Image: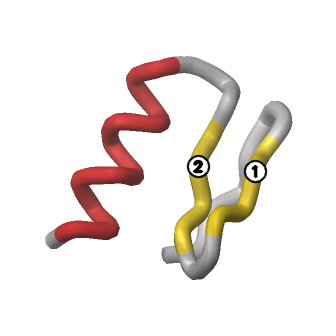
């Protein structure tokens, strides 16, 4: 997954989590598990 975040981003392993808001974080978590 590649995305252009509009806020702070943290990289955990191969995962990219957005700290912009909880919705974006949960969305990326779902995409990562898909």
Q: Which mark is first along the chain, 1 or 2?
A: 1
Which percent across, then down, holds residue 24? Answer: 46, 34
- Farthest right residue? 8
Q: Quadrant of residue 27?
A: top left
Number of residues whose C-alpha sits closer than 10 Å to that of mark 1, classed few (under 14), some (14–19) or many (20 or more): few
Direction front: furthest residue: 13
How far is the residue under mark 2 from the one under mark 1? 6 Å
In the image, what residue occupies the spot 34% across and 52% down? 29
Question: Which residue, given by chain and number where applicable, does mark 1 sit on?
Answer: 10
| Closer-to-camera residue (15/20) | 15
Residue beneath label 2, please?
17
Q: Position of residue 34 (x, y in %)?
A: 15, 71
User: Which of these two is toward me, 21 or 14?
Assistant: 14
Q: Is residue 25 left or right of residue 9?
A: left
Q: Are marks 2 and 1 in contact (CB under 8 Å)?
A: yes
Residue 26 x %, y %:
34, 36
Q: How many marks?
A: 2
């Amino acid at each position: 997954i590649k995305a252009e975040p509009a806020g702070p981003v943290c990289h955990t392993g191969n995962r990219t989590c957005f700290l912009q808001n909880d919705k974006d974080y949960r969305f990326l978590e779902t995409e990562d598990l898909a």
